[in-house]
Image: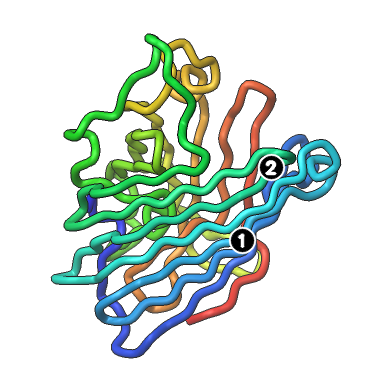
């Protein structure tokens, strides 16, 4: 599964919770809380996201997202990914089911609108050996030196894209409640299918503009989780950083 979630997991159930703030131009635009639980044989991630600050005035967005799967033979096998959100008058629900790393069913309500000729369709081959966006945020590695230099094949129910990580630097980090060693990866976005050719947003993200994420080890486990990051967009650089952390 791209090596993104595997284990050296604890013998007993563990829980990790982190709160993040997303901002642009120094102004908060969203807040989120993610809770991860795992045992020797399974994992589950639940998240709540909502717009905040000025963003909430112009576009009130609230939603939940969940992912779960098995941990077997030191590999993750995502089984379920669900997204349910409301943004202004728009409502969207997505459910993706997976078996052995392959997508077996996708449901969207409302269903996608009819696609134009410029749409890049998702083919069956694109849905093999993939992870959902939440599973991809947990990186399994023996040491910080092994966190980067990997590619996540992500599918969110519509878009299929590759996120390729490469090493940038390793340095002490103090972010929110965390203080310790951090490793920063550069991220390269490559759209595969499920998008419109000529989309300015997709083209900008795929154009090699600056994207990076700093990871830190989760307690004494082999999991590394995001501490902070930034993504250059057409309207400015979006930053996220962790605040409160609790868990192992």
Q: Is residue 189 visible?
A: yes
Say above or below: 27 vs 98.
Answer: above
Residue 154 position, x and y percent, is: 34, 42
Say above or below: 61 vs 18.
Answer: above
Residue at x 39%, y 17% (from the top left corner):
119
Mark nearest the camera among 1 and 2 is 2
**Which quarter of the picture shows residue 232?**
top right
Relative depth, front residue between 136 and 193: 193
Q: Is residue 175 visible?
A: no
Residue at x 29%, y 61% (from the top left corner):
79
Residue at x 60%, y 27% (from the top left corner):
233
Q: CB atoms at circles 1 and 2 under 8 Å apart?
A: no
Residue 11 numbered mark, or none? none
**Which quarter of the picture shows residue 108?**
top left
Local secondary structure at mark 1: strand
**Which quarter of the picture shows residue 68?**
bottom left
Q: Quick one: which residue is furthest to the bottom in this view?
A: 12
Residue 123 position, x and y percent, is: 23, 29
Relative depth, front residue between 66 and 40: 66
Residue annotated with mark 2: 87
Residue 84 position, x and y percent, is: 55, 53
As drawn, is 88 to the left or to the right of 44? Answer: right
Label 1 to label 2, Cα distance in Å? 14 Å
Residue 88 position, x and y percent, is: 74, 40
As drawn, is 213 to the left or to the right of 161? Answer: right
Residue annotated with mark 1: 48
């Amino acid at each position: 599964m791209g090596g993104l979630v595997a284990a050296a997991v604890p013998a007993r159930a563990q829980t990790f919770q982190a709160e993040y703030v997303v901002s642009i131009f120094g102004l908060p635009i969203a807040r989120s809380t993610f809770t991860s639980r795992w045992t020797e044989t399974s994992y589950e991630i639940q998240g709540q996201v909502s717009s905040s600050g000025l963003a909430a005035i112009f576009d009130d967005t609230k939603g939940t997202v969940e992912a779960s799967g098995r941990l077997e033979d030191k590999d993750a096998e995502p089984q379920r990914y669900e997204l349910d959100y409301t943004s202004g008058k728009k409502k969207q629900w997505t459910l993706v089911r997976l078996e052995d790393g392959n997508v077996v069913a996708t449901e969207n309500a409302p269903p996608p609108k009819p696609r134009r000729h410029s749409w890049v369709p998702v083919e069956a081959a694109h849905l093999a050996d993939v992870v959902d966006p939440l599973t991809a945020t947990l990186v399994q590695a023996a040491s910080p030196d092994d966190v980067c230099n990997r590619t996540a094949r992500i599918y969110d129910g519509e878009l299929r894209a590759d996120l390729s990580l490469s090493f940038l630097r390793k340095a002490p980090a103090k972010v929110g409640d965390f203080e310790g060693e951090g490793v920063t990866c550069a991220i390269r976005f490559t759209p595969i299918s499920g998008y419109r050719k000529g989309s300015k947003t997709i083209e900008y993200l795929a154009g090699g503009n600056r994207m990076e994420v700093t990871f830190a080890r989760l307690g004494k486990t082999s999991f590394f989780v995001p501490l902070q990051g930034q993504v250059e967009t057409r309207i400015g650089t979006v930053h996220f950083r962790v605040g409160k952390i609790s868990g192992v």
